[in-house]
Amino acid sequence: MKAIGLAARSATFMTGAAIAGAFLLSTAHAADSRAAPPGLNHLPWFIVPGSLRTTTYDGVSDDLLTAGLGKTGLQGAAPAIANPASPTAAELRRLAIWSNYRALVDMSTNGGYGRLWGPNVDLDGNDTLGEGKVPGTEYLAYADNRNGRQNVTLMVQVPARFDPNNPCIVTATSSGSRGVYGAISAAGEWGLKRGCAVAYNDKGTGNGAQELMTGTVTLMDGRLATAAAAGRDSLFTVDAGAADIARYDAKFPYRYAFKHAHSQQNPEQDWGRDTLDAVQFAYWVLNHQFGHNAGGRHHRVRYEPGTITTIAASVSNGGGASLEAAEQDTRGWITAVVVGEPQVNVRMPRSAQVLEGGQPIEQAGKPLADYVTFANLLQPCAALAQAATGAPYLTALPLARTTAIRQARCASLAAAGYVAGGDWQAQADDALAKLHAAGYEADSDLLQAAMWDSQAVPAVAVTYANAYTRSSVLDNLCGFSFGTTNAASGAAGVPPAVPPMPTVFGLGNGVPPTNGINLVYNDGANGAADHRFATPDGSFAGAVCMRRLWAEHDPRMMASVRAIRVEADLHGKPAILVQGRSDALVPINHASRAYLAANSAREGSRSQVSLYEVMNGQHFDAFLPFPGFDTRFIPVHYYYLQALDLMWHHLKDGAALPPSQVIRAVPRGGTPGAAPALTAANLPAIAPAPGGNAIAVGAGVVNVPH
């Protein structure tokens, strides 16, 4: 791979000799660590030879946090690309930072951006940092297990203000299926402001995409190449022969494969290891940058494992990866954990139990494969329930068309025996009741429509079903594929209006719909089409197929889910979980509450885990500017930042962590789409003594107040 080409004023690179020397040391160390010179800083064995590149940013023309856009540019329109057909690596990086930053936080000023969080807001919550650009050095490399197929992207950012005498690391494992910058606003920004090195990784998912028609793939820096030319430098290449791909393309043109769904490796089983690898890579970087020179290219080890304050931090499945890494950590790489809305699959002990207001939640602690396939089946119908009346919608479809799809889904569910009721209203009410029984909070009723209409749940269901069954893109699992569609009719197999591959690294999220690539149901009544329109009931048969993979114990799926289960044993490490009670993508009963209960059962008195459960908080802060979200829901990100601050003061000053509690945040109200500005009155602080809002935890039993 070639080094990223950037303007000389903002970038410098490791020399070829320095990189080669580092890799020679690495190779020697991997071959026989006993023969390596003692006390020297060896590049970790898992770093792919030839993949390392280093870039220094001046904090003016370009920087670590905002790619030179600053606070204002991040809030503005997408940065321009000189030649849209062939963006440079620097342009793709800037686009990726812009899109990933916005993906996880509310970017509206009334919602809090630039006032309560953002590059310009200092750690005391004040607007003192101007445009918030952060100078420093960025290290990028692939990690692999030597088979040439994993290519997990690792990145370490070291801010110029890093204090080598008081070192710290914050992890920022990507959320969702995003690329390596996927948690830059969630954890990266906070870490850089603290002067910490930030250790990122893309969990072996990222925006690894392949256009089957042309064989075009993405590289680590987002540029494109043919699969043949890229070879082992490809972020992801389909594991199939050219003839098989050609036959598939002839039948299903304009289709795409994505790494998370189609790598056939169940990448989730390695997310904890990937996060630990990122921390180990950060240690190497800091020893390389601040260790004493031992002559020539050699540096001595200044920081041994466990000598750097390290917080494993991220959100969603990046948060789950952080918890998994802390559980797997046996060398003291990780000091503490702070995660938001963690998507984590807990192996629940028999003694673990979740209660709300003293009443047991019977289905707590179910894995994602179970609850997301169930939700994908029932949500379109449940959205019509009386309790969901007035729900905010994200769909661009006319309401009449949306209602018709939902009513048809209700009818199909009833005919198949999944719900009861003589008409669509009764069927919808029953569908919602069944979601409640499956562990979904009533607080999330108003979000059932949005989760399906935004395609968040269908996309997750299809992506993870493919990953867990280790299916190839050529399998069209349950009749689904990823492809471009006609905007008006939804028909698939059509040329894209704008070619998606040139900017998929910058604008993509790793799952459809992404950058013009949609979720396609191939078995539609009139041929392949956008899954919402392929059949009158929204591709019901495909949803049933995916549900049966779990319900009928497909052995591939069962094995993969067993491999990703966590024990909830953090070996006494302090940890904070932050999650909104209204989360309708990752229900809190299957995530944070379940983890807290299992941790209490397994660690007992050693446990240092706190859960801060936020009322009126949901999974997607990026939805908050939309009408109806702005009036009803508050930003969980605000409390996630507070949790990071609390953990920092606990580690550095010995301050006690507040106990588990419910935070009764207050919606902004007002007119949908024009809610008043978010203020402190909406955001009560995490309390040192929560009184009646305390969550009782003991002997594996968690009791959450109403």
Image (spheres, rainbow, N blue to C red):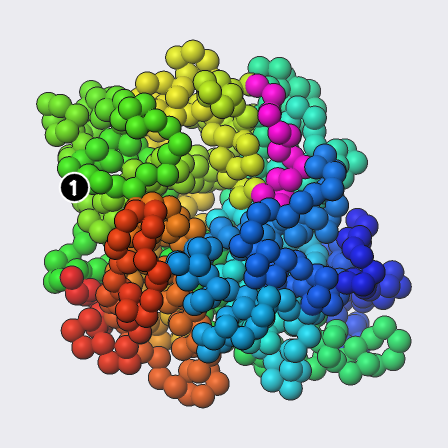
Give the residue at mark 1. Answer: 387
Amino acid type of the residue that numbered disc 1 sits on in the rendered structure? Ala
In the rendered structure, the answer to whether residue 668 lies left or right of residue 425 reads: right
Q: Quadrant of residue 506?
A: top right
The residue under the point 47% across, 30% down is 519
**Would you place residue 123 above or below residue 89 in this image?**
below
* Residue reaching furthest to the top: 526
Please state which of residues 134 and 407 is positioned toward the viewer in this rendering: 134
Residue stretch in magenta: 494-507
The percent position of residue 159, horizontal first and vertical second, equals 65, 72
Crowd around label 1: few <14 · some 14–19 · many ≥20 (10 Å): some
Quick check: is 651 in the magenta stretch?
no
**Would you place residue 536 above or below residue 461 in this image?**
above
Quick check: is 497 in the magenta stretch?
yes
The percent position of residue 126, horizontal first and vertical second, equals 47, 75
The percent position of residue 32, horizontal first and vertical second, equals 76, 66
